[in-house]
Image (cartoon, helix red, strand yellow):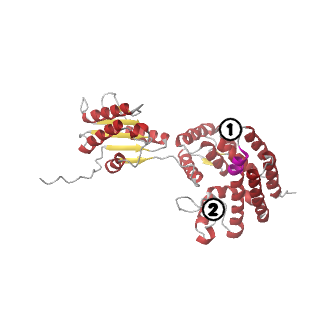
Amino acid sequence: MAAKPKTTPQKSGNFFAVVGSDEGLVREKALDLYNQLTGGVDDGFTHETIDGIADNSESAFEICSSTVQALLTLPMFGGDKVVWLRNANFFADNVTGRSQRTEAGVESLRATLERGIPDGVKFLLTAQGIDKRRGFWKFIEKAADVQVHDRIDTSRDDWQDQVAALVTRRARELDLSFQPDALALFVMLAGEQSQQIGNELEKLDLYLGTGRREVTEEDVRVLVPLSRAAVVFEIGKAIQMGNASRAIQLIDEQLEADESAIGIMRASVIGVVRNLFMAKLIIEKLKVPTGNYSAFSGGLNRLPEADRAWLPQKKDGSGVNVFPIFLAADNAKNFELAGLQHVLEATLKADQALVTTGLDHRLVLHRLIVEIASARKAPVRRR
């Protein structure tokens, strides 16, 4: 007898998966999809929701068995039925997920899905963590209508760009707009979690009411809680503005909170000085317009390769990491190029002093901050 040919699973229109590391967005999109599939009507009898949080491998096996049983049981009163395996945590690369008992349960679920879900039954699977190296994920990709919502990776150089784009898009849905400094501060305060971003935007929406729809930096300071990332941003901003006393005050607070001087240097000072220097070169030598972000970004990415090869690039190779340089561009106009070059060299020496000498760390940082502030041109006073 000839062997049966292997069949490739086809998307049937009754299997849906919403997965990803952005827990808030996964929950939000899954609930929206569930309401669409059920027509927004759940009487407690027709549809079944199964909690996917497993405490151990035996619990994971039982959850899979319950899901299989729910998929094969037609609704009591006829009509369509939606089975939702919600917030499953045993598809991840963890102790429970790697257990043989868990794998047996998952394989049973997969076999049921491969044989085909009965007519009139729809299956929705949601999971915040899923190991994409495993066969079950490869099956899901082929057989289900999949949505993937992953958290923005803050280890990437362009994470601020991505968060700023997300904030701008979601703010627009609320008819909100941000002043540039307000957007930069909000990005640092709210972080990369879409749920947190959404919560903070809703607070701003309620705070502003119907009269004013542009978010200022002061609005952000009043409503969004200060985080460590925001302190880093605040130190950097004080440095750019030539506000040495504010920068020193924040640095001293961080040192008193047991933050390392080297950590403060690397997180709050070196990047700021480097961005000021690069922004000044771009303004003076490359003549890129700095009026708004779109013009600045487009101008940089249209430069010949040789003119932008020295600029920080996004890790995915899609262009220049624009956002931090754009934030520095306005303040860079208040420095001379030679002054910034001197500051860059002074910063390198200060960093080396922190690492290789026994000099007082607080004094090293204070001297550097004063030196940077001294390089900033005094604003011209109008008579």
The residue closer to the viewer here, 260 or 140, is 260
The residue at which mark 1 appears reads as 222
How many residues crowd mark 2 within 10 Å: few (<14), some (14–19), many (20+)?
A: many
* 326 left or right of 63 in image: right
The residue at which mark 2 appears reads as 296
Instruction: Say above or below: 134 vs 55.
Output: below
Residue 39 can be seen in this image: no
Q: Residue furthest top?
A: 44
For mark 1, give the secondary structure: helix
Q: Quadrant of residue 350?
A: bottom right
How many residues crowd mark 1 within 10 Å: few (<14), some (14–19), many (20+)?
A: few
Assess whether residue 263 is covered by the magenta stretch. yes
Q: Which residues are magenta?
A: 260-268
* 129 left or right of 243 in image: left
Instruction: Say above or below: 92 vs 9.
Output: above
Assess whether residue 22 is covered by the magenta stretch. no
Q: How many marks?
A: 2
Task: Identify the residue at image location x=67%, y=55%.
Answer: 327
